Image (spheres, rainbow, N blue to C red):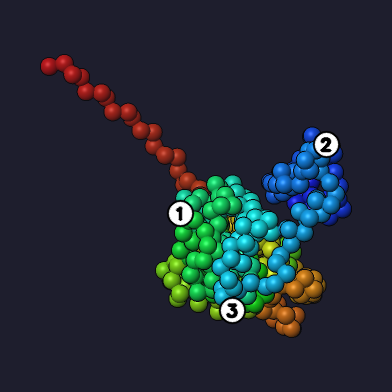
């Protein structure tokens, strides 16, 4: 079986001063690992063409965050140095990878969807506008302050950045945000329905869902309505629009929430068509899942509720199944019409 190396595996090899040329040719590399490996091999060669552990370690240190936290008032030279650093490049590549996953799963269409990562006190990296998430490149990314002003980047920042920034301002734990339009979850958003609970453990542990009323995308009003919910929810259904998630860890976790809520909403739709009442967890079983969730540092409005207050799905109305009534008598046979002659 072929070995798979992730970005973290390559970073660990760099820290240990390993010989990167010794990696077997048939090793499978994740996109981020491949890019990091390429950059390391290009930048750490001695005149003789050999890679030295000392220089490899130097490259590893350059992938760490700045020792001095940056903000929108930092000198432009420092902001530019950060924006073009190996550390920032790694974050940009992570966004590109998540963009490819969103596009491959059909969670975005056209140039829809956007992402952001907090990189300082009041600055963030974000995706550009009018670019498909399936073809993002690191050089497409933008650096903005928390008022939405673009500080660096060749392309124009996403038009929906204010929503991401308002989430980060309201929720200090929010490190990364992801917005897209997964069809099943967006269907619940269009219907204005919060998915029912107590059915799948992954959903209960990773997601805490609420619905924000519709406002024009990209406006401060839209951002405020979403931000009002993020203290206790990490997955927001935006009415008649889509979904936005946030993570206190990284952009990949924000993306995971998209996969989880979309799979959950799809499962609910399939379950509703089976014509039987769904089985659910007991309140005690849900309480056990909430303890796991709290230990992971995820938000949820149900912490501290009594067991009798959990698993309340009274508003869930999955609809009815289609039943074809039996025919009381056979349909009369129809006689095909005689084709009219074209002769006079």
* Foreground residue among 98 and 72: 72
* Foreground residue among 193 and 156: 156
Q: Which numbered disc flags the more N-terminal residue, 3 or 1?
A: 1
Task: Find residue 299 and report its image quarter.
Answer: bottom right
In the rendered image, which residue does mark 3 sit on? 170
| Residue drawn 45% across the image and 74% down it | 220
Q: Is residue 167 left or right of residue 342?
A: right
Q: Tell me where residue 306 appears, x and y as whole percent.
A: 74, 83
| Residue drawn 59% across the image and 73% down it | 74
> For the residues marked 2 and 3, what is the alpha-carbon distance in whole angstroms?
47 Å
| Residue drawn 55% across the image and 47% down it | 135
Q: Is residue 220 left or right of residue 17?
A: left
Task: Find residue 215 and report its image quarter.
Answer: bottom left
Q: Tell me where residue 141 appears, x and y as whole percent.
A: 55, 57
Q: Is residue 103 above or below residue 174?
A: above
In the rendered image, which residue does mark 2 sit on? 24
Helix, strand or loop for disc 1: loop
In the rendered image, which residue does mark 1 sit on? 130
> For the residues marked 3 and 1, what is the alpha-carbon distance in whole angstroms?
27 Å
Q: Which numbered disc flags the more N-terminal residue, 2 or 1?
A: 2
* Foreground residue among 164 and 209: 164
| Residue drawn 48% across the image and 70% down it | 149
Q: Is residue 87 above or below residue 212?
A: above
> For the residues marked 2 and 1, what is the alpha-carbon distance in whole angstroms?
39 Å
Q: Residue furthest left?
A: 344
Q: Which numbered disc flags the more N-terminal residue, 2 or 3?
A: 2
Q: Tell me where residue 21 appears, x and y as whole percent.
A: 81, 39
Q: How many marks?
A: 3
* Foreground residue among 308 and 304: 304
């Amino acid at each position: 079986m072929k070995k798979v190396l992730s970005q973290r595996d390559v970073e660990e090899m760099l820290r240990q001063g390993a010989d990167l040329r010794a990696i077997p040719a048939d090793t499978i590399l994740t996109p981020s690992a491949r890019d990091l490996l390429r950059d390391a091999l290009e930048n750490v060669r001695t005149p003789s063409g050999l890679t030295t552990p000392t220089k490899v370690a130097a490259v590893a240190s350059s992938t760490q965050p700045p020792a001095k936290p940056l903000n929108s008032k930092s000198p432009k030279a420092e902001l530019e140095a950060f924006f073009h650093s190996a550390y920032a490049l790694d974050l940009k590549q992570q966004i590109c990878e998540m963009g490819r996953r969103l596009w491959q799963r059909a969670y975005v269409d056209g140039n829809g969807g956007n992402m952001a990562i907090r990189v300082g006190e009041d600055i963030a990296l974000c995706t550009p506008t009018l670019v498909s998430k399936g073809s993002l490149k690191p050089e497409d990314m933008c650096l903005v302050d928390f008022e939405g002003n673009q500080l660096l980047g060749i392309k124009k920042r996403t038009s929906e950045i204010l929503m991401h920034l308002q989430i980060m301002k309201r929720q200090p734990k929010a490190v990364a945000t992801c917005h897209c339009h997964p069809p099943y979850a967006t269907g619940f958003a269009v219907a204005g329905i919060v998915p029912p609970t107590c059915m799948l453990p992954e959903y209960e542990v990773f997601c805490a869902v609420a619905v924000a009323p519709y406002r024009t995308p990209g406006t401060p009003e839209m951002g405020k309505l979403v931000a009002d919910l993020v203290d206790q929810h990490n997955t927001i259904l935006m009415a008649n629009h889509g979904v936005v998630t946030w993570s206190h860890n990284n952009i990949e976790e924000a993306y995971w929430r998209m996969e989880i809520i979309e799979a959950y909403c799809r499962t609910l739709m399939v379950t509703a068509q089976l014509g039987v009442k769904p089985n659910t967890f007991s309140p005690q079983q849900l309480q056990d899942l909430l303890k796991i969730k709290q230990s992971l540092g995820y938000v949820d409005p149900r912490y501290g509720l009594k067991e009798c207050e959990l698993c309340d799905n009274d508003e869930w109305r999955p609809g009815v199944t289609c039943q074809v009534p039996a025919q009381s008598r056979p349909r009369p046979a129809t006689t095909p019409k005689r084709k009219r002659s074209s002769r006079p």
